[in-house]
Image (cartoon, rainbow, N blue to C red):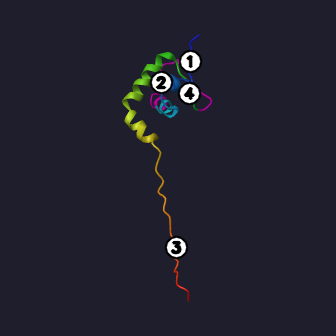
Amino acid sequence: MTTRFSISELAEMLHVPVSYIRQAVDALANDLTGESFVFQDRNWRIGPSDVKRIQEWIVEHQDELAEASRPRHRRVRSRRVATSDQDD
């Protein structure tokens, strides 16, 4: 029986965020071996022979992945109400 890894297990093994693994698997879905398969919507079981391919894809696309995962900065605008100190 072949040992297969979940996306979270693979992310922990490769020391990368789960989102990186998910993007790599989605991009390589047609190129993965028969040992890796999807079940229950987006849950993957990844075979050991595909780990190296996923790792190489992450290294090749590391800049794009880092930029995509960078949090967007919210632009906060505050208004100040000017009050007059003069008594009428």
Q: Does the magenta stretch include residue 31?
A: yes
**Secondary structure predominantly adopted by residues drawn in magenta:** loop
Which picture quadrant has residue 27? top left
Is 19 or 80 nearer to us in this picture? Answer: 80
The percent position of residue 48, horizontal first and vertical second, equals 50, 16
Instruction: Give the residues drawn in magenta, as a range.
Output: 24-41
Q: Point out the frontmost of discs 3 and 2.
A: 3
Label 4 sits on residue: 8
Quick one: label 3, few (<14), some, or many (20+) residues within 10 Å? Answer: few
Disc nearest the viewer among 4 and 3: 3
Residue contact between numbered discs 3 and 2, judged by CB atoms under 8 Å: no
Element on which disc 2 rests? helix
Who's the residue at 39% across and 33% down the image? 62
- Sequence-wise, the earlier of marks 3 and 2 is 2
Q: Name the residue under label 2.
A: 14
Residue at mark 3: 81
- Given the image, on which type of amino acid does mark 1 rest? Arg
Q: Nearer the viewer, mark 1 or mark 4?
A: 4
The residue at which mark 1 appears reads as: 4
Front-most of residues 19 and 86: 86
